[in-house]
Amino acid sequence: MNNKTDTGFFTFPQWEGIPSLVHGFGKRGWTGACFDKIKEFRNLKRIFLKQIHSNRFHVITKIPRTPPEGDALLTDKPGILLVIKTADCLPVLILDKDNRAVAAVHCGWRGTSQRIIQHVVAGMERCFGSRPENLWVGLGPHIRSTCYEVGAELPVAFEHAGLPLNVFTRLAGKPGKFLLDLKKANFLQLMDTGVKEAHIVFNDICTHCQPDLASFRRDKKKAGRMLNFIGFNKMI
């Protein structure tokens, strides 16, 4: 993963040669105003969500008057930049090169337990004709399992949803406490949809451990949010 220190966001080098594609995972301090300072972003209309920790997604065909409620955005329209906010949750960017369609997904434990990533892949297949085996997926900075302590209600929720429990590790000496691997949980769901393992790229950057990234677990109300984004510029 490239660390664009001069711009304040990370990118995947595997995606940087794709014509007109822009994407990234913003660091702390990367705000909406920062987009206007970089030429490749100036002609893109930014779309945000009112995130509610759900499995709801919205297909964007035109600029909405107000942010829609949900946790994922999809579009095949050039000139639109999809943006999601995170502060420990897993940001997922999805790319369909053939149909020039993209998605940005906010995967917290609630959305993950509700299979949001699978709903989005199915939505891209239905709306854009995307084939799961042709999708490319990027998993961005998030709280790693070594720092993500959760209660016993989470394994129960995953079990009720029919999801694998091998994403949880019991914490020794802490009855009823577990560590949750968000990356693994969503990786397994992506594999179940037919996305190829070789098409999934990720990083091991932990938001909780890296001070220049937003972490609600570490900083609570002072955490701020990271802006994670993807879109296609209009072809010239």
Image: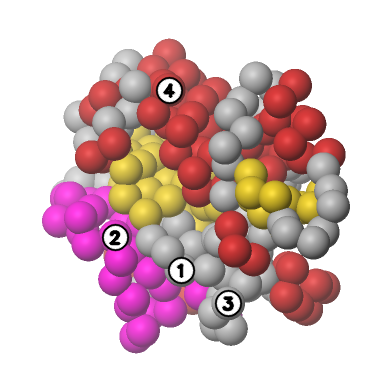
Of marks 1 and 4, which one's residue comes earlier in the chain? 4
Along the viewing direction, whichever of 165 and 107 lies nearer the viewer: 165
Q: Residue 56's mark? A: none
Disc 3 residue type? Cys
**Which region of the structure is painted magenta?**
1-30
Residue bearing the label numbered 1:
205
Position of residue 158 in the picture relative to residue 184 (left or right): right
**Cα distance between the residues tagged 4 and 2:** 23 Å
Q: In which quarter of the image is the N terminus?
A: bottom left
Tell me the SS state at disc 4.
helix
Q: Position of residue 103 (x, y in %)?
A: 44, 39
Q: Residue 192's mark? A: 4
Disc 2 residue type? Phe
Disc 1 residue type? Ile
Residue bearing the label numbered 2:
12
Q: Residue 209's mark? A: 3
